[in-house]
Image (cartoon, rainbow, N blue to C red):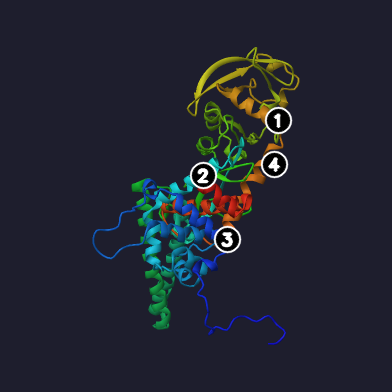
Amino acid sequence: MTHFIEGLDRHQTMLLPEHLDDYVDENSPVRVIDAFADILDLAALGFDTEPAATGRPGYHPALMLRIYLYGYLNQVQSSRRLERECGRNLELIWLTGRLKPDFKTIADFRKDNGPAIRKVCQQFVALCRNMDLLDGDVVAIDGSRFKALNAKAKNYTRGKLRQKLGEIDKAIERYLGELDRADEVFEQTGTVLPEARMERTLRKLEHLQKEAVRYRSIEQRMDETGETQVSLTDPDARSMATTARMPRIVGYNVQTAVEADNHLIVAHEVTMLGFDRDALSMMAAAANEVMTTDQLTAIADKGYYKGEEIVASEEAGISVVVPKPMTSNAAARGQFDKADFAYDGDKDVYVCPAGENLTYRFTGPQDGKAIRTYWSGACADCAIKDKCTTSKERRVRRWEKEDVLDQVQERLDKDPAQLAVRSMTVEHPYGTIKSWMGATHFKMRRLKNVGTEMALHVLAYNMTRVMNLMGIPAMIAAMKA
C-alpha cells in the first residue's frame, strides 16, 4: 500500500478529542435545516410542544421535523430508512445529537402532525418573500399525476366491474359446460373422467363464484354511496389519464404554481380530480396571496381553459394567459368555424365570412350560463352557405361574459412566447420531485396524509432551490436576520 494516500489507523488514540461539530462542513445543507427549525414557532404552527406529564419522555417535535427535512432533502422518505440513517449518517447524528428514534415514532410524527407540517411549508414560502425572492409578477400553473399506494388491480370503476363480471360469467359457463359433458359421458359410457381434473374444475368454479360475490359487493357499495370509483388500498386514490400515449395511473393530481423568476413553488394543492379545468382560479388566488406584486399574471396550458375559472381569476385582479382548445369539428367538415366570424362590440353583431351581419336575437340559459344567440336573415340566398351550415341559418352563440375571454385571447396573441415560459418554469419542479421519489408512489394513504407528504417534497425542493440561489452561509444569515 506504499506510495498511496493512507487513512488513519482505526485503533489510533487521538491526543485531542474531536467535536461532533467538526464532522459537518460549514457549507453543509444540514446546517440550513437546523437554522430553519430554530426560527420556527412550533406551538403556533400546531405542533404539541408540551411534554407529557407522566410516562416516558417523548422526542421534541423540532427534532422529528429536522429528521424529516433531512430525509426529504436527501431522497430518504421511508421511516425505516430514516431510523437506520440516524444511527450511521454523521450529518443526522450531528442534527439529532446522537438520538435515534425508532421507525414507528418517526412514521407517527408525519401521520399525526399533517396540518402543522403543511404550515411549515407555507412558512418557508413566507420566508422566501421576506428575502425578496418572490418579487416577480408571473407564475406558471400546471398539474401532474402522482402514483398512490394503490395498485391498478385494486381500483374499480363501473366499466371495469362490468368487464370483470362478464369475464367471470363466461368462465363459469365454460366450466359448467365441462361438468355437464362429464355427466353425459358417464351416462352414455359409464366412464368417469380423472378425479384430479374434476376437483380442479370445481375449485376454479368455487373461486370464480367468490370473485363474483366480491365484485358485486363493490358494485353495491357504489350504488349505495354514489361513488364512481372504488380503491381498496387507498380509498381516496383515483384512476386518472396522463397523456394519450401513456396508460392511466391510480393516484392524485398535484397542482402547483411556480413563480417564473426563481422557479420557487409558491402554492400547491393535492386533488382527487383527474382534470385541471376547475383549478385555475384556486391556484392563481393562492399564488396571488403570496407574491408581492399588485398585478400578477398566471400562465396555464389549454387544459385549464374554462370560462368561469378565467372570469373568476380576472375579477380577482389576476391576468391569466390560457390558450383556447380547438373543440369544433367545423373545419374538419370543410365549414367555417366560429373563429371565422368577427364580433363587433360597438354594434353587438357578428360579421360572417360573406360580410353579412348576424344580429342579436335572444338570451337563453345553457349549462348555467346566459348565452346570447345571433343570426342573419340573409343565409338563404348566400352563395357560400354550403361552407357555413346545413340548417336554415347559421347561428352563433356568445356567453354574456365572453368579452373577458376575448381579452385573454388578445393578450396571448400579442405575446405567444408566454406559453414557452410556462413549460420552462413549471415542469422542472415536477421532474425533480418525481426523480427524488424514484419509480414509486406516495408512502402514505388518504388525501390528507398525501397532502402532508407532498408538502415535505415541496419544502425540500424550495429549500434546495434557495440554497442554490443564495449559497448556504448567506441563506442562514438571511433566515436569522
Residue 420, disc: 4
Q: Are marks 3 and 4 in contact (CB under 8 Å)?
A: no
User: For the residue labelled by badge 2, is the local secondary structure a helix, a strand or a loop?
Assistant: helix
The residue to which callout 3 is attached is 26
Which residue is pictured at 62% across the width and 40% down the height?
301
Q: Nearer the viewer, residue 260 or 219?
A: 260
Q: Are marks 1 and 4 in contact (CB under 8 Å)?
A: no
Residues at marks 3 and 4, CA–CA distance in whole angstroms: 39 Å
Under mark 2, the amino acid is Leu
Residue at the limit of the structure toward the front, as seen here = 15
Residues at marks 2 and 1, CA–CA distance in whole angstroms: 36 Å
Residue 455: in sight, yes or no? Answer: yes
The residue to which callout 1 is attached is 413
Under mark 3, the amino acid is Glu
Residue at the limit of the structure toward the top, as seen here = 347
| Relative horizontal placement of residue 395, taking residue 52 as reference (left or right) | right
Residue at the limit of the structure toward the bottom, as seen here = 1
Residues at marks 1 and 4, CA–CA distance in whole angstroms: 13 Å
In this view, the mark in front (3 or 4): 3
Residue 480, image x, y percentages: 51, 48
Under mark 4, the amino acid is Ala
User: For the residue labelled by badge 1, is the local secondary structure a helix, a strand or a loop?
Assistant: helix
Q: Residues within 10 Å of mark 1 (few under 14, many from 20)?
A: few
In this view, the mark in front (3 or 1): 3
Compare marks 4 and 2 and give the one earlier in the sequence: 2
Which residue is pictured at 37% across the width and 59% down the height?
60
Q: Quadrant of the N terminus?
A: bottom right
